[in-house]
Amino acid sequence: MATMDLEALRQQGHDLLERAARPVARLLMRADVTPNQVSGAAVVLNVAAAGLVLEEALIPAGVVYLCAGSLDLLDGTLARVSGQVSAGGAFLDSTFDRISEGVVFAAIAYLFATHGEPANAALTVLALLGSLLVSYTRARAEALGSRCNVGMMTRAERVVLVALGLFFGLLAEAIYLLVALTAITVAQRIVHTLRELGAEGRRRDA
């Protein structure tokens, strides 16, 4: 029951953000900006955020990282508003998201390493692995015909958590939480998918 409530709450939050993004999306549509251009701009901002992390300007890095995360939402909204939804665009968006996460987490790991915190650097790599697995398990499950949107640590939640760590000087704590919560999300998605695929197999055999 708690999991269903969490999913409903997350969906309500996503719907609210979607509605808020539509006026901006319509302005971009009138300016002939494409969803792929917005996705590309998000990558550029994430690279900028990574550069700021390396410069140890963590609060500006958090601001830029949140702006990049907003563009991650906006590109999908723009695609829907402008009727430009496509498989190619979805593929490009997902690929750009993984590049963006990799660049930012690499910068965070480097920051920990240069401060003599190898354990935190290693945990950052695990946090990146968890983030990639959250996305991979959903993509692989859906390729096999299973709807897999369970779990708490989607891309939006990961962006917010890391940004809060940057804002408040709690980057290590944010990484610890990310490692734990992405592991839980991956486990939820594995269990959910195996149950769904098992149920589908039983229905076919019946």
Image: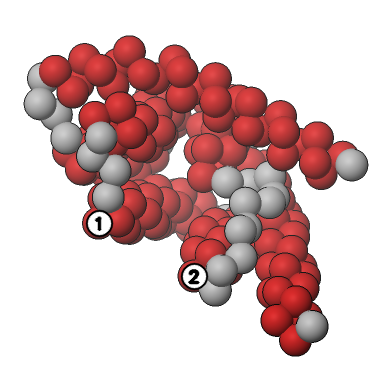
- From this view, report whether residue 193 is shown above or below residue 33: below
Q: Nearer the viewer, residue 172 or 188?
A: 188
What amino acid is at disc 1? Gly
What amino acid is at disc 2? Ala
Q: Secondary structure at mark 2?
A: helix
Which residue sits at x=80%, y=35%? 5
Q: CA distance from mark 1 to mark 2?
A: 15 Å
Which residue sits at x=18%, y=23%? 29
Q: Secondary structure at mark 1?
A: helix
- From this view, report whether residue 47 is shown above or below residue 180: above
Judged left or right of residue 55, residue 32 is left
Judging by the rendered image, the residue that carries numbered circle 2 is 143
Judged left or right of residue 77, residue 128 is right
User: In the current view of this chain or complex, which residue is farthest to the left?
Assistant: 32
Tell me, yes or no, if residue 134 can be seen here: yes
User: In the current view of this chain or complex, which residue is farthest to the right?
Assistant: 1
Q: Nearer the viewer, residue 59 or 84?
A: 84
* Residue 176 place in picture, x, y as percent: 68, 50
**Residue 8 placement: quadrant:** top right
**Residue 78 placement: quadrant:** top left
Which residue sits at x=54%, y=74%? 144
The 10 Å Cα crowd at callout 2, few under 14, some 14 to 19, many 20 or more, is few
* Residue 2 place in picture, x, y as percent: 87, 40
Viewport quadrant of the C terminus: bottom right
Judged left or right of residue 193, residue 63 is left
Judging by the rendered image, the residue that carries numbered circle 1 is 88
Viewport quadrant of the N terminus: top right
* Residue 40 place in picture, x, y as percent: 21, 43
Q: Earlier in the sequence, mark 1 or mark 2?
A: 1
- The disc placed on residue 4 is none
User: In the current view of this chain or complex, which residue is farthest to the bottom?
Assistant: 205
Tell me, yes or no, if residue 140 can be seen here: no
